[in-house]
Image (cartoon, helix red, strand yellow):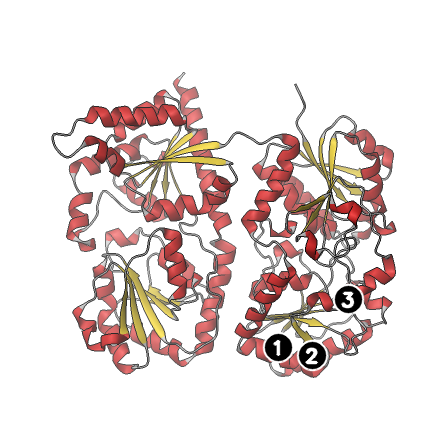
Amino acid sequence: MQQSAHVVLILDLLQDFNILRPIACLAAFETDMPVSILVSKRFTDRDSQGLWATELSELVKTTGASVLHFQSDFEVYSYLASKRGILFAGSESDLNAHATSHRIFRFVPSDFLKVTLQHGYECVGFLQNREQSMAFGEDIRFAADIVCSWMDGEHLHHLRPTERAKLMVTGPSARLKAGHQSPRSPTPAAATGLICENLHSVRMNIAGDFKASYMDTFFGFSGAMDRAGRSVALRPHPGGQYVIRNGVKLPPNVVLENEPMYRVDLSRYAYGISAPSSVLIDMVLAGIPTAVWHDGGDQLDTGNYAGLARVSSLEEWCTFAEAAIANPTPFLLRQTAFLEQTGILVDHDEVRKRFLNLLWMVSGRPAPRRILFVANSEIPTLQLGFFKPLQPLIDAGVIETRLLTEAQMRRILGKKEPNPRPAQDWISAQIQEFQPDVAVFCRYSGPFAEKMIGELREHKVPIMFHIDDDLLNVPIEIGEAKHFEHNKPERLDAVGTLLREANLVYCSTPPLLQRFGRLGFDTANMAAGAIYCSAEILAPAVERPVHKVGYMGFDHAHDFELVLPELVRFLRERPDIQFELFGSIPKPSELDEFAERVTIVPPVRPYSAFLAAFAERQWDIGICPLATTDFNVVKANTKWVEYASVGAAVVATAGMAYDECCADDCGILIDGAEGWCDAMHMLCNDPKLRYQLVLNAQAKIARDYSVERLRDQVLGKIDEAQVRAATNSENAL
């Protein structure tokens, strides 16, 4: 039997860690390939502060990787001689600075595929600036079998013809979300900018010595910001660490930001300035106004950053910072065009797919995981809770899905004298044909629940029941038709059966899980998710006057009625404001007096189309009233996530779903029916406050409500259902 393919990473330069860490996490979390890390003596010696030793120790704990600290080629060869797999280097070429990895690539056993990664936007052998060409020449060669680039060959002006046959476009490894870390540093004060130094770079010495002028300007800028009552963050280059190694004394309003880049949330800063460096790309991708520093006489080559704002003198630094804080939109539009011009592949899911395909070249593609979904129809919960986060895995062939719906079963049953046998046979055929690895019932309350559970158990298929409302106690307030349908005895029986019989009941919120416990269900087979709805930032925060307020609802008129009197008052007092109702909620007659100022937007399906349409509405404020009912107490904070993702500041009911997400100045909470009008007036009167609330909320979404985090949660719950099913089977023997 052939041994498992290994993923082996070479750490030689300090900056290699940032480049290779995502590969280690991807391999550990999404493949069965063992991970090994080769650490050179040079890497250890240069880590004078022990920062990277700590990070390496944590990475080993996270991934289970093996580590070899080596001083000689023989040690490396002996370690790899009995292995096969794929070998990654973050800095490999025939240059002296890259000699360690280059040498290893030349003697490594032939059972290893050797891969060199483009380690920066301007990278020797890929895309060089003038100073790099002056220092190193333009005939750079690689010992790799494959060179992974950030962009297509047409943008790689310094990739030699002999190397182009090796090219594979993967995008930057930093775009992988594997091993994502939350920031450890405190949230910066409002209007704090990030200044990055790249003073060890060859470009800062070849065309002239610019270190002193850069730092002089920085000190002058820090003083100007101090007089304005603002802080400044300074980030040293991870390898050069100029200000630290030279003991540069920093002004009191300067905060040192020296965490690894994967622990820094750049979006929390108001703007960024850097000498030419790949960190400019990081700041652009984080969605903050970004300026590239130049020397003023254009001795320094900044041509690869053409399109970004440029600063040189102290006055230009200050002017840029003030403009970026006041209105980031022009800079962000300019940066979008710049990013397109670079050709860099930045889509997280596409980058992940390409790196996985690379790993599978040596390990073989695993059999897809087959998930059978059962739902009443293609409901929004199914789309936002499962299909949206899992779609990249579905597209990559890692997961296969099949959906059985109540609507399909009803069509087979027929309306006149329904015969259950054909529908039951159809269900059996679907299960036998698809052979699922796991079955997920999503809010299901339709027919044949008990029949499907029995059939799945016969085939030893684990069962998970996802539920996001108390479907055993649906109140009449959500609408008579829905109340009648949900409270049919056969539907209540189906929900009860699934709550009792599923290997895992995956509840949308902890309060919902607790509710089922109080209703007498055994909660030992239940678990709640940390988040229910994920989002990407569809419309970044923009400081602007308020023109539109909105509410999204689907038949829950009793919630909207809570805020209606104060909304009417607000619209009377603000004749310049438009109001919008998005969804199937009927327009109350109380809003008729505002005529064309009130717009009704009908529901949009599927969920992906809804999100795109929602972002186009350009809401400035979104209201989230919730009536105090037992049904609402267990609901999730979906509206906050969706409102904030499209750039709307949230005003929401206190004491229920929105308390945690609105904390830390990410929304305004209102206790009861009074205070809504005043809150909306406050946001209209203070555009900076509204902007800051949205900025904070979007940072929280990126950190805590990302699609990647929900994907990990969903896969974790499915894994848990499978483990519980296996444990139950063992206990039954």
Disc 3 and disc 1: Cα gap in Å?
22 Å
Name the foreground residue: 473 vs 110.
110
Q: Position of residue 449 (x, y in %)?
A: 26, 31
CB of mark 2 within 8 Å of CB of mark 1?
yes
Residue 340 percent location from the top left of the image: 60, 61
Q: CA gap, disc 3 to disc 2? A: 16 Å
According to the picture, the residue beneath numbered tag 2 turns out to be 221
Q: Secondary structure at mark 2?
A: helix
Question: Which three-letter amino acid code belongs to the residue tagged 2?
Answer: Phe
- Which of these two is toward me, 206 or 604? 604
**Residue toward you, 35 or 402:** 402
645 or 120, which lies in front? Answer: 120
In the picture shown, does residue 304 fall above or below 9?
below
Q: Earlier in the sequence, mark 3 or mark 1?
A: 3
Write down the residue under mark 1. 321
Q: x and y percent of residue 687 in the render?
A: 44, 77
Residue at the disc numbered 3: 243
Labels 3, 2: front one: 2
- Residue at (83% x, 56% y) in the render: 138
The answer to which of marks 2 and 1 sits earlier in the sequence is: 2
Number of on-image labels? 3
Q: Which mark is residue 68?
A: none
Left or right for 239, reference 490 = right
Residue 333 figure quarter: bottom right
Q: What SS does tag 1 mark? A: helix
Q: Furthest residue to the left? A: 417
Amino acid at circle 3: Val
Relative horizontal placement of residue 475, taking residue 405 as reference (left or right): left
